[in-house]
Image (cartoon, grey):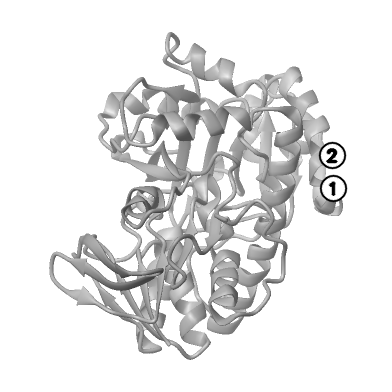
Amino acid sequence: MRVLILGAGVIGVTTAYELANAGHQITVIDRQSKPSMETSFGNAGLISPGHSFAWTTPKLPGNLMKSLFQKQQVFRFKPHWSPGLIRWGLRFLQQCTSENMKTNTNRKLLLCSYSQTKLHDLTAKTGLDYDQKTNGLIYIYRSNETFNEAKDKLNLLSSLDDKMELLDTSELITIEPALEPTQSKLSGGIYCKTDESGNCFKFTTKLSNLCQKMNVTFNHDETISRFETKGDEIQKVITNKNEYSADIYVMALGSYSGLFAKQIGDYLPVYPVKGYSITMPIFDVSKAPLHGGIDEDNMLAFSLIGECIRFTSIAEIAGYNTGFKPSDFSYMVNLAGSLFPDAFDFSKIEYWAGLRPMTPNGSPIFGNGTMKNLFYNSGHGHLGWTMACGSAKITADLITGRKPKISLEGMLLN
């Protein structure tokens, strides 16, 4: 079959790889000049089934309200008008119950674990190098309150029981000596020995190069203008440069998927949640962490990217604005320095902000909507790379009529 994939981020490229492996003729189009230039470019770099917890906790609505008055909140809402905000926002708030949090966490964990297995299959087959570190991730708790909450939340990850270690402060320092200078400010941690980190941009770029050797065509600098449809099928995708006809279409446009889905009569509940990252050289290797992980009290993720380190934080509901200024990152810079003092060269920071494509329940959307030859693979939120390889396999299975290996309850549009 001829398949046209819309979007060349990590979701689109992994889908191209799976479908090319199945013998299909694949074309990928993207508005950027090369693959992985949007959400996949500056993300946290973590592959973390051990952090599949749903964002939709009972506390979240209150935290979003506080953010209107307190600038240093990790979860933020900036009042704005944007297409779909009210409808999506109401669905999002409806998910913020204890019961929904448990359901959403278990669903995300199922997909994340499956996807990590598919990632391992891919790397074993291709030998792809992307600065991967497979020595586990650490989840750090600064206060007794958050550490005690973490103990309770671990029950939601029962399938990872043998892979998660609850650590007191001294045990945490033993695993991650770089935390010794801040030991007095920590209450404990969790070590998930099977979680990983790496460079998502490098992974996606190298995989796209491999796809081209498999006769996948990538057409960049093309912006989708409109769709031509007939009945319940897409006939053509029109861009600023070309017209494309295919047997099957896959929408992997991240935060913009909902806007394009609307053009063909579907409501796709995907909305952008802005994240920020800083990347800088490691100044003193002896003071830098050996593992990636998350400072849970501040939702500050960190990962080793070659000879650099990256910190990401903040979940900001602010529409489709990706702009930033260096002062927007001051809180993150201070937190990074307090966690690992004198380890990094803060004079050479690379700043970045991007949009996470969030659904109300935190799980992506697969399958068809109005058009029977269009398949969605969108809405992966903050775990896009963790979910990518599994999502690609699910999409390939659906296209070819095979039953996916995991349940898709809560992850289908219809």
Work out whether residue 374 or residue 112 is closer to the camera in this orientation and state it: 374
- How dense is the environment of label 1, judged by Cα within 10 Å: few (below 14), some, or many (20 and up)? few
Amino acid residing under circle 2 = Asn
For the residues labelled 1 and 2, say whether their Cβ atoms are less than 8 Å apart.
Answer: yes
The residue identified by callout 1 is 158
Work out whether residue 372 or residue 343 is closer to the camera in this orientation and state it: 372
Could you tell me which secondary element the residue under label 1 belongs to?
A: helix
Residue 318 spot, x, y in % from top left:
36, 29
Image quarter hosting the N terminus: bottom left
Image side of residue 108 versus residue 301, left or right: right
Q: Quadrant of residue 96?
A: top right
Q: Quadrant of residue 213?
A: bottom left
Image side of residue 281 versus residue 123, left or right: left
Could you tell me which secondary element the residue under label 2 belongs to?
A: helix
Residue 174 spot, x, y in % from top left:
75, 41
Considering only vertical position in the picture, is 92 above or below 1? above
Considering only vertical position in the picture, is 319 above or below 357? above
Query: In the rendering, which numbered label is found on residue 155?
Result: 2
Considering only vertical position in the picture, is 260 above or below 399? above
Q: CA distance from mark 1 to mark 2?
A: 6 Å
